[in-house]
Each structure stands twice: as C-alpha cells, then as structure tokens.
Amino acid sequence: MSRSAVWHPFTQHATEPVPPTIVRTDGAYVETRDGRRILDAISSWWVITHGHRHPKIVEAIRDATATLDQVIFAGLSHEPAERLASALVDMTPPGLDWVFYSDSGSTSVEVALKMALGFHRNNGFPRAGIVVMEDSYHGDTFGTMSVGARGLFNAAYEPLLFEVDTIPFPAAGRELNTLDAFERLTRHRKAAALIVEPLVLGAGGMRMYPASVLAELKRIAERSETLFIADEVMTGWGRTGTMFACEQAGIVPDILCTSKGLTGGSLPLAATLATDAIFRAHYSTDRTKTFFHSSSYTANPIACAAALANVGIWNDEPVAERVAALSRMQAQKIARFKEDARFENVRTTGTIAAVDLSVGNAGYLAKVGPKLRAFFLERALLVRPLGNVIYVLPPYCVTSDELDRLYATIDEAAAFVSDKR
Ligand SMILES: *Cc1c(COP(=O)(O)O)cnc(C)c1O
C-alpha cells in the first residue's frame, strides 16, 4: 500500500507510530481494524458525552438526511435550528436569549470575542482589551491562540498574536491574587471582556478552581461593565457535574460558548449564546452595526438534528443521575493515589479526574509522553497525558469495572515511568 497522505493533528510524524485505523465505534469503545476494542477514556478529545453512536442520535441523523442537507443560514432558516435554539435558551442559565451558530469550539470563541468588541463599539464606547486567565486554552485559530496560553504550541505564530492581559490562575490559597489582578485591570474600564474556562482549564492541564472564584470574577466584571465570556466548550453538557459549569457559581455569563458535547459528540456544531443587551447593541437600522460573521456550515441542519436528539436524551433518560454516579466513582477511584508519592494534586470536578505524575523534569516528560500513550494503547486504553498530567474524562456510559481496569493501568504506568527514569 502507498503511504498515507494524512497529516494528523498535534502529531509528530517523524517519531510517532502509524496510528491504528478505527473501523467502528460503540459506547465507551473504539474498535480497530484488527478487532481490538479500545476504551475511550478521553471521550475522543472530550466530545463524546453519553457514549459513541447513541442510538437516538444515530436515528436523528438518519431521519434528518431524508429531507435536509446544508442550507444557507443568512436569509433562510430551518426547523432543526429554530427548535434547538429555543431548547438551548431553556437549558442554559436564564438571560442568555440569543443563539448564534457556528461549527467548532474555536469558532464559537471567535464569535464571542467579536460580539464583545461589537457590543462596546456599537454602544459608542469602544473597548478592545481582553482579559484572560493564565494557562487557558480556547482553540487553535489566531484569535483563540491570542487569548490562550503562550508556549510551545504557538511559539511559531507568536509574532501575529494580539496582546491580552493575563490574570494568574487562582491556585488554592492564592485566589485573592487572581481577583486583585482582575480588579486592577478593569479599573480603567478599557477591558471589553474577560474570557474564562469555568471551573476546569482543560488543555492547560485539567487545572481546577472553585466556583466561588468564578462568582467573584463575575461580580468584578459586572461592576466595571466588562463582558464575561464563559468558554464552556469542554465543561458543558454535564462534564463538570452540572449541565453547565457556570451553574455551580450561580452566575449568568454575558456570552456562553458551547460545542464539543452539543451533539453528544457525533457531529461538529457550536453555538455562542448571548444576552439581549448584546443582541440589542447589534440591532439597528444602521447597517454598520450588523454582526458580520458567518461560517459556510453555520447551523448545519443534520448537526442541529443530532443536537436536538442529544437534548432529548438529557430530557428523557436519567443522564443527570448517570453524571452524578460517574462523578462519585471518579472521586472514589482516583483517591487511591492520594497517599502515593508518585502522584500529586489528585483532583476531580464532576466527571473529570486528574492527577500529576511527580516527575521533576518537564523536558524528560515531553519525551516520555508518546511512550506513555503507547503504553496505554498496548493495554487497549485511549489515554493522552497532558505533559505530566494524567486525566480520565470518559463517556458517561463507562462502567465501574472499566474504570477499575483503567486506574490499575495508570498505577502500572507510574511504575513504568519511574523505571524509565
Ligand atoms: C476544545 C476547546 C476549544 C476548541 O474547540 P474546537 O472544536 O477544537 O475548535 C475551545 N475552548 C475549550 C475550552 C476547549 O476545550
């Protein structure tokens, strides 16, 4: 066979092995061509919620294709998008009344940033500053890289990234530093918006902080009329224990971004929800105030139908109970590493569990990362450590026995890493 023409994401083709070909997905598993069933412990990069190929979502996709494919969404509308928008308004914190569709998490964040700048400009008091949290991740486009942490992954593009103001991560015991920094930055009322990943910083290493900090950040934002953007692309749809993470802080963001779990992980779709005040700032007989944004596949009807089926599953099945049970299991099972010197920072938020491998040298870890991935893959587990952070972010259908096998293998992996040292 000739070599593959595929250039894979976040993949160093010079050193990484040829990836296995997946021919089937099912529940918590992905199956390779040679028949191996691999437990998807990272929900295929955080998108799968209920499990792969939930029958109701598969059926909804099939049904939708009987009558619709892509339809231009400027000047035309369709029922799946209309129904989904009203469902999203109902399910998200009250006050988020408008739904703008796009096709990926990154785009939903780009839309949020544009809405924030448009809001201030159209209201006659332009502001352009964006405040971000240290170690955040919001996507891989230029705008989202600009508001995300700088480092290895975007060093080559740094010359074209725009400047932002960064507040420190609210590490335990240092929460006040974060709040004070934000207070100082908003004092001159130049910041258009604060963008945060509520409760859990995903790609930044599954760093977790309490809801009280989120609530306090919102209060400071309100006082200075700085818009509060909640990037719930990873945290939404039950991942942190509640439907959306903001609920745990009892806050309503001005703008909320959702994607990954929106279709249960089956098809690409995203939505940026906004308050009426933000919509009204763009609502005018003056056409220069129009919100100028679109992607070709905005509100794809088939993806909207999949998302509606996902909403139906949340309404008709005991998903909240499943999420609660999984959250308890995760907390119990990862606790085995608490008194273990090979691990640090054992932590969970809802269904997400993470632990740091106690290895001093990060450079060394960069090398061991691919070896760790291979170690897990050989044992039919899909796990992708972030540096020295091993995390478990499974679909909600994962069983207690499957998690036991996974945690036992993480234990072995720690021994494997110490041996290699
Ligand atoms: C994954 C992620 C994004 C980007 O989503 P894509 O669909 O990959 O573009 C943005 N924000 C957060 C918090 C994410 O985890």
Image (cartoon, rainbow, N blue to C red):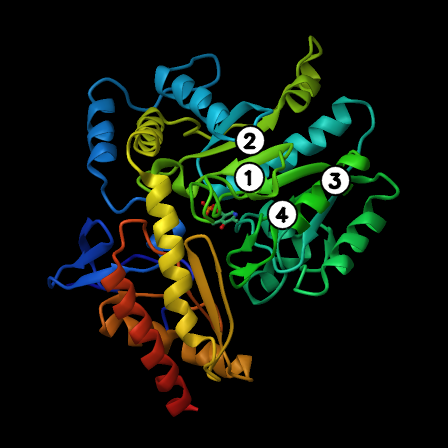
Residue at numbered disc 4? 196
Amino acid type of the residue tagged 1 in the rendering: Glu
Residue plotted at (66% across, 14% down) = 283
Q: Find numbered disc 1 in the image and state the secondary structure of the residue it sits on.
A: helix
Looking at the rendering, in which quadrant would you find the N terminus?
bottom left
**Apparent side of residue 189 relative to residue 68 in the rendered image (left or right):** right
Pointer 4 or 3: first along the chain: 4
In this rendering, the answer to whether 225 lies above or below 6 is above
Whole-number angstrom distance, CA of label 3 to CA of label 1: 15 Å
Residue at numbered disc 1? 247
Amino acid type of the residue tagged 2 in the rendering: Pro
Crowd band around label 2 with a 10 angstrom C-alpha radius: few (<14), some (14–19), many (20+): some
Pointer 4 or 1: first along the chain: 4
Identify the image quadrant of residue 13: bottom left
Disc 2 to disc 1: CB gap under 8 Å: yes
Whole-number angstrom distance, CA of label 4 to CA of label 1: 14 Å
Pointer 4 or 2: first along the chain: 2
Amino acid type of the residue tagged 4 in the rendering: Val
Crowd band around label 4 with a 10 angstrom C-alpha radius: few (<14), some (14–19), many (20+): many
Whole-number angstrom distance, CA of label 4 to CA of label 3: 14 Å
Question: Front-most of 402 and 144?
Answer: 402
